[in-house]
Amino acid sequence: MAKMTGFYAAAAMMVALSGPVFAEGETAATVIATVNGTEITLGQMIALRENLPPQYLDLPDDVLYNGLLEQLVQQEVLAQAHTELSARDTANVDNSRRAYLSGVVIEDVVTSSVTDEALQAAYDARFKDAAPQQEYNAAHILVDDEEKAKELKSQIEGGADFAELAKANSTDTGSGAQGGDLGWFGLGMMVKPFEDAVVAATPGKVTDPVKSDFGWHIVLVKETRTAAQPTLDEMREELAVEIENKAVEAKITALTDAAKIERPGAAFDPAVAKKTELID
C-alpha cells in the first residue's frame, strides 16, 4: 500500500479514545466496522496487513491495528463515493482480480513443486552422468584492428610483458587495468570465437589474433583445470528456479489444454490496444 492517508493521525486518535477490547472466537468473517451497512471484516484487515511495507510492521500492535481499521474505513467511504463505474474502472477491477487469483495458483504450484526429492532428481539429471568440465585461467588484450593485435603479439614474443601491454593498449579497460587478467571461467561464459581460441590455445603461449564482436583479441591461457562439480547445496537456488518454472509451465499447459478457449481478438489490428478512448 503506497499511500496511507491520515494513517498516523487516525491511529493516534483511536488509541487515545479506546482501550483494548478482546474478541472471542473471532474468524475471518468477524465484522470490525460497517460503512453505510457494508461490512469490513477481520479477514480483510489481516490481508491488508500482510501487504504493508516492512517499516509499518515495526509499529506497536495497537497503533497498527487502529491505523489499519481507519484506513479500511476511509477506503470504503471513498469507494462508496464512486458510484458509477466506468469501462476503465471495471477493466482494472477485473484485471486485479484475475492477476491476484492467478498468482495464488502459481504460488501453490511453486510451493508444492520444490521438494527435497525434486531437487535431488534435478541435480542428478544435470550432474550424475555429466562429463568433467574444463576451466581456464586466461588473460587477453583487446584492440580495434588485426594489425595492432599482430604487432602486440610480436612484442610479447620478443620479450615484452603481456600485463604491461594490456594496461597500455587494451580497449577492455576493466581487465586491462588488471594486466588483461580474466580470472577463471568455464565454457559458455565467453563469446564463441574467444572461447574457441581459449580451448585450442597452448597454455603459456599467446594466440594469433581472434576476432569477435568486440574487436581483435590476443589471448594468453595461463593454466587449465578440471572444474569441481558443484554440490546440491550450491545448486539449490538455481535448481529450485528451474523446477518452479517447469511446474508453472506444466500447470498452465494442463489448464489451457483442458479449457475451451476462443480468441476472436487474434484477428484484430494490434493497434486497437492503444485506443484508450474506448475505456474513457
Image (cartoon, rainbow, N blue to C red):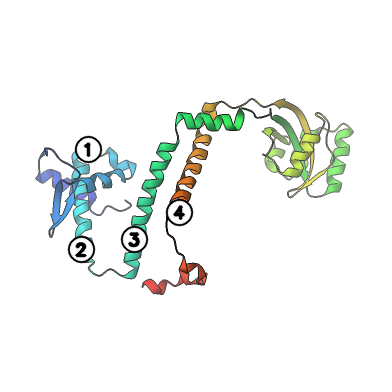
Q: Residues within 10 Å of mark 3 (few under 14, many from 20)?
A: few
**Which residue was labeled with disc 1?**
60
Measure how far apart labels 3 and 4 are at the Cα level: 20 Å
Where does the image place residue 210, in percent across and percent down from the top left?
A: 81, 44
Where does the image place residue 261, in percent across and percent down from the top left?
A: 44, 60
| Foreground: disc 1 or disc 4 | 4
Q: Residue 80 — which label?
A: 2
- Which residue is painted at 88% across and 33% down in the image? 157
**Which residue was labeled with disc 4?**
256
Q: Earlier in the sequence, mark 3 or mark 4?
A: 3
Would residue 170 be seen by someone viewing this image from the given angle? no
Residue situated in front as seen by the camera: 184 or 13: 184
**The residue tagged with tag 2: helix, strand or loop?**
helix
Q: How many marks?
A: 4
Tell whether 22 sits left or right of 101: left
Measure how far apart labels 3 and 2 are at the Cα level: 18 Å
**The residue tagged with tag 3: helix, strand or loop?**
helix
Task: Name which quarter of the figure residue 52 lies in.
Answer: top left
Q: Residues within 10 Å of mark 1 (few under 14, many from 20)?
A: few
| Foreground: disc 4 or disc 2 | 4
**Which residue was labeled with disc 3?**
94
Q: Residue type at mark 4?
A: Thr
- Which residue is painted at 32% across and 65% down in the image? 90
